[in-house]
Image (tube, rainbow, N blue to C red):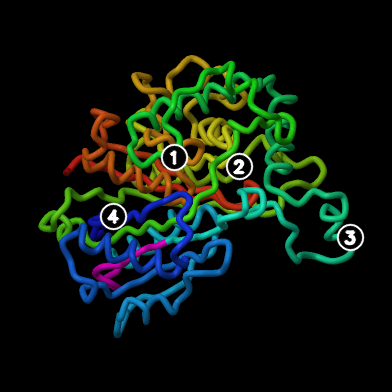
């Protein structure tokens, strides 16, 4: 198989960026990624986009970038799993000879100057009518509520505690301290986590991800070609998806098992490696609970023992399993599933500066979409960097 690699990375300013549209930000991210790879925009023959919360960017990004005669063009919609899905689709296209250089991009502008994160993701949206829309009638309209239900189910079933979830937030903030683009770099303690406002029991404010404006893009090409370009290549060794769908029905395993249990092992098999070979994990962390359940489902610890696994500092700087080494979505910035991808690329290249992890042969990356409804896994490698 003609193995693919990530050859370029583009990241715009992130956070409270109000003066540019999502489409403008997406175009800038692609141009940054192309330049980072040492290519020209005209070298692209593939473009994959993921629209943000306001429906942009779309396929028309091709025109904004001035691209002609593309061999691959699509919108990928798997919510927070989309970036990993895009990269997998691009890698497959490279392997099949369908394209030679594919840009994958996500942009979003949910924050408004006089608004808040709650305004961006907590407002009621049009949805099912009648009994199918009962949850809207009782006010169950935000992701916070449904993830709180999932976290509580895990706690009741396995004895997981809020303090154990807090250990994840503390560890990731410690990583963020050495990330110059992280929104929050000041250290936090477990006491501060426990004293932060309770948003939806059992989730505290410090259990919940940030809301950010910005864009990120990568350029995927063949590993052979990438070795001759401007940046050290990060090879794509394996990938897989899993979409459990609606899992909140009676007697379901909602909150206990996610698509990570299927996608993780499948991606590892494709890469020809096992969990014990993984040097670091960059996990989709919309909530601290999501990190914990993903680690369990990937097989880093037995089911139900995630709380004990994360509580002893093994995810923090100096720990045996570096996790979300840029601070993740909890402390750095939220660009959907591109947040873990950005950090994985930097680590794989050996360009993460003070937070660089020494061993980077096998990097496991996750994307999670909806309320545990969609999952995608990537196995990347910086061995050749």
Pointer 2 residue: 258
Q: Nearer the viewer, mark 3 or mark 1?
A: 1
**Of labels 2 and 1, the one closer to you:** 1
Whole-percent x and y of residue 68?
Answer: 29, 84
Q: Residues under labels 2 and 3: Cα distance?
A: 26 Å
Q: Quadrant of residue 41?
A: bottom left
On screen, 349 above or below 66? above
Q: Reading the chain from its start, which is encountered first: label 4 or label 2?
A: 4
Q: Which residue is mark 1?
A: 183
Give coordinates of residue 250: x percent, y percent.
82, 43
Left of 356 or right of it: where is 123?
right
Q: Secondary structure at mark 1?
A: loop
Residue 375: image location, x then y, percent: 54, 49
382 to the left or right of 377: left
Q: Earlier in the sequence, mark 3 or mark 4?
A: 4
User: Is 147 part of what is drawn in magenta?
Assistant: no
Q: Is residue 158 left or right of residue 66?
A: right
Residue positioned most to the bottom: 69
Q: Circle 3 sits on which residue?
A: 131
* Residue 9: numbered disc: 4
Residue 65's quadrant in the figure? bottom left
Q: Residue furthest front?
A: 114
Pointer 1 local density, CA inside 10 Å: few below 14, some 14–19, many at least 20: many
Q: Tell which circle, 4 or 1, labels the residue nearer the N-terminal end.
A: 4
């Amino acid at each position: 198989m003609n193995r693919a690699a990530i050859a370029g990375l583009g990241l715009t300013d992130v956070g409270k960026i109000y003066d540019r549209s999502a489409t403008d930000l997406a175009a800038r991210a692609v141009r940054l990624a192309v330049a980072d790879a040492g290519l020209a925009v005209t070298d692209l023959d593939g473009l994959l986009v993921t629209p943000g919360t306001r429906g942009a960017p779309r396929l028309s990004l091709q025109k904004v970038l001035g691209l002609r005669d593309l061999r691959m063009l699509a919108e990928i919609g798997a919510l927070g799993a989309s970036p990993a899905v895009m990269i997998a689709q691009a890698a497959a296209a490279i392997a099949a000879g369908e394209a030679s250089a594919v840009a994958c991009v996500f942009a979003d502008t949910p924050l408004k100057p006089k608004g808040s994160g709650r305004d961006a993701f907590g407002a009621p949206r049009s949805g099912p009518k009648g009994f199918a829309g009962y949850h809207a009638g009782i006010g169950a309209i935000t992701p916070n509520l449904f993830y709180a239900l999932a976290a509580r189910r895990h706690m009741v079933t396995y004895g997981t505690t809020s303090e154990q979830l807090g250990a994840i937030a503390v560890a990731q903030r410690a990583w963020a301290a050495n990330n110059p683009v992280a929104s929050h770099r000041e250290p936090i303690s477990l006491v501060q986590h426990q004293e932060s406002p309770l948003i939806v029991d059992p989730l505290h404010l410090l259990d919940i991800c940030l809301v950010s404006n910005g864009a990120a893009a990568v350029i995927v090409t063949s590993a052979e070609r990438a070795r001759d370009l401007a940046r050290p290549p990060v090879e794509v060794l394996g990938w897989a998806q899993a979409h459990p769908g609606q899992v909140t029905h009676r007697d379901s395993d909602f909150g206990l098992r996610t698509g990570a249990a299927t996608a993780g092992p499948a991606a590892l098999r494709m890469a020809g490696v096992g969990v014990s070979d993984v040097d670091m994990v960059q996990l989709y962390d919309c909530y601290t609970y999501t990190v914990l359940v993903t680690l369990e489902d990937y097989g880093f610890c037995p089911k139900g023992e995630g709380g004990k696994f994360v509580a002893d500092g093994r995810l923090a700087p100096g720990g045996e399993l570096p996790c979300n080494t840029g601070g993740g979505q909890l402390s750095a910035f939220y660009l959907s599933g591109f947040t873990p991808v950005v950090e994985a690329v930097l680590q794989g290249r050996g360009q993460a500066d003070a937070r660089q992890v020494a061993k980077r042969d096998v990097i496991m990356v996750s994307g999670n979409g909806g309320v545990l409804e969609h999952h995608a896994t990537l196995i990347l490698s910086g061995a050749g960097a």
